[in-house]
Image: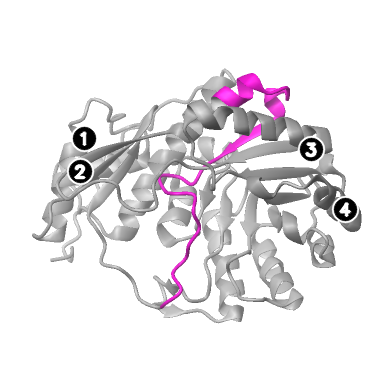
Amino acid sequence: MLPYRPALRFKQGEYNAAGRIRPAMQKHVRPYFILPPLIEKDPELQKVLTHDEIAYLTGERIGKHWPRYPAYMDTQYVMREPSDEEINRLFQVARARNPNLIVVIPASDLGNGLWRGLLLDTFPRAAIHLRAEALDGDVLRDGLQTLGLAASECEIFVDFAGLELDPEIATEVVGGTFNELSEIANWGCIVFQGSNFPTTNPAEAGKTQLVPRYEWTVFNAAVRDCDIPAERLGFSDFGADCGQINFPTKKGQAIPIPHVRYTTKTDTVVIRGKAGGKQSEVMKAVLKDLVARPDFAGKMFSYADRRMWDAANGHATPGSASMWREWNMAHHITRVVHDLAAMSGLSFEDELEHEEPEQIDMFADS
């Protein structure tokens, strides 16, 4: 079942989370980086990036935050009608920092000869992204033939974002899709990709909402029901986020809502701060509610749990919207690695206690 393949939108909080989880877990994680489009303002540079800047900064950030282990790079959204030269440049720069980056090829574009030059020499040579509702065996077989690529050399991600993940309905659909794909070709790995998290914040101001992890429930049931060996199946979700990739089409950013999305074994707990008030105080109250819950995994479960516990108890600043996303994602990645490891008979120890508490930022937001 391992590695875990989280689909990350390559925002600052998400690549920071991937880079800061403990090394013992990193080798069991293979991030699926979805590069955002040019319209998105870069939070570090505070401007919209040019094509050359995207290529350079993507490579630099991957090199800084994920330099050692394999990761997927999905360029479907990063540029509008990019040229072959621009895509090649993007991979050239990024692979100079991490040579283990796996190209993600949209199933509908398998016949494009561009991808042939971006295949790796090791498994997986490429990953294919397939929207479940668009499954077409002829398209897949013809595309693989065009690229001179065997299905056994690939991983195929089946995106179920368009499917309502009610376990009573979705399990049969997902298992049937797995079986259909295995009849088309002998894939190196078939990866479920989906999320039950809604497209908008489900919690009202000052309230807590539980979102069932139906993507996890459905995947486990489909693994049991389908005819494919478990070692040839993989799991990918979108962290504590929805599976609909709808990047903004206009410049500008919404005002952040103080809240936390905390993944437990069965649910995502969404705790939303009260409306109004000083942002840092509202978020501190959110985190105090979180660490008081019986399903809080403990401050040593991950570095993110420790930082949320510190902030709740006044030992650190409650952070910014980017930091909340990082904490949500780092905890989520740790939780799912534990879950997948348990299916393989593996286990991990909690984080080691740190002697020095994190220093409080004297310039925290007002």
**Residue 287 circle label:** 2
Q: Are marks 1 and 2 in contact (CB under 8 Å)?
A: yes
In the rendered structure, the answer to whether residue 116 lies left or right of residue 157 reads right
Q: CA distance from mark 1 to mark 3?
A: 43 Å
Determine which residue is flagged by label 3: 187
Q: Residue at x 47, y 32 (%)?
A: 166
Of label 1 and label 3, which has the lower sequence position? 3
Determine which residue is flagged by label 4: 142
Query: Is residue 342 covered in magenta?
Result: no
Q: Which kind of residue does numbered mark 1 sit on?
A: Val
In the rendered structure, the answer to whether residue 113 lies left or right of residue 167 reads right
Of label 2 and label 4, which has the lower sequence position? 4
Q: CA distance from mark 1 to mark 2?
A: 6 Å
Between residues 291 and 303, which one lies in front from this camera angle? 291
Between residues 196 and 233, which one lies in front from this camera angle? 196
Compared to residue 361, the image places residue 149 above or below, namely above
Between residues 243 and 127, which one lies in front from this camera angle? 243
Query: Is residue 248 covered in magenta?
Result: yes
Q: Are marks 3 and 2 in contact (CB under 8 Å)?
A: no
Magenta stretch, main secondary structure class? loop
Determine which residue is flagged by label 1: 291
Q: The N terminus lies in which quarter of the figure?
A: top right
Q: Which kind of residue does numbered mark 2 sit on?
A: Leu
Residue 165 screen position, x and y as percent: 49, 36
Q: Which kind of residue does numbered mark 4 sit on?
A: Asp
Residue 319 screen position, x and y as percent: 25, 56
The segment highlighted magenta reads 221-250
